[in-house]
Amino acid sequence: MALMPQLNVVCSRCGKPRGLTHTCFSNSTKKAAAKPVLSFGKCEKCKKPVGNPLTHTCRPKSDFQKRHREHEKQEKQAAARKRQASAHDYQACSDKDCARPLCVAFKRGYQSGDREGYERGWQAGYDRGFPDGIAACPRSHQ
């Protein structure tokens, strides 16, 4: 990388390159004057201005690759969690000590619903049933 030093003239008030017809639009109270500045042009690799060639480091313009890798990683983890969750069926779980929240909620709901159903059914008179069997049922069973 061959850096050639250049001597440029900039406005001392606004810092913009100063030509013959420079009009300064600054609120500063400083006097507008020409100030010589040594620069090394733009870096050939990153196309950014090189202030000091000894301390200049080229940085990537975008972090897209990093964000894309992170997104892919999160998608892969989500798919693995989904596969793991679908492998355990909470309705068919026969382990009474299963600590998975879905299994615990399903079992509690099933027990309370079953208990309340028997209690309400007894109050409604379903304990008697149909004395003549299926023939006494008003619905068609064919």
Image: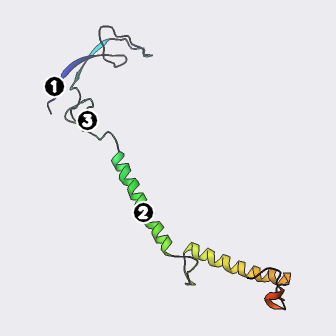
Q: Which is nearer the eye, 48 or 94?
A: 94
- On the rendered image, what quadrant is the N terminus found in? top left
Q: Nearer the viewer, mark 3 or mark 1?
A: 3
Report which quarter residue 126 is drawn in. bottom right
Report which quarter residue 43 is drawn in. top left
Q: On the image, numbered disc 1 is attached to which residue? A: 4
Name above or below for residue 136 compared with residue 44.
Answer: below
Number of numbered callouts drawn: 3
Residue 46 % position (x, y): 25, 35
Q: On the image, numbered disc 3 is attached to which residue? A: 46
Q: Quick one: label 1 or label 2, which is nearer the N terminus?
A: 1
Work out whether residue 129 can be spotted.
Answer: no
Residue 97 % position (x, y): 56, 83
Name above or below for residue 38 compared with residue 63.
Answer: above
Residue drawn at (37%, 18%) of the image: 14
Helix, strand or loop at label 3? It is: loop
Q: Which is nearer the eye, 85 or 45?
A: 85
Q: Quick one: label 2 or label 3, which is nearer the N terminus?
A: 3
Q: Nearer the viewer, mark 1 or mark 2?
A: 2
Classify 10 Å Cα crowding around label 2: few (below 14), some (14-19), many (20 and above).
few
Residue drawn at (48%, 66%) of the image: 82
Helix, strand or loop at label 1? It is: loop
Kindly report the distance in space between the C-alpha atoms of the residues bearing marks 2 and 3.
35 Å
Kindly report the distance in space between the C-alpha atoms of the residues bearing marks 3 and 1.
16 Å
State the mark number for residue 77: 2
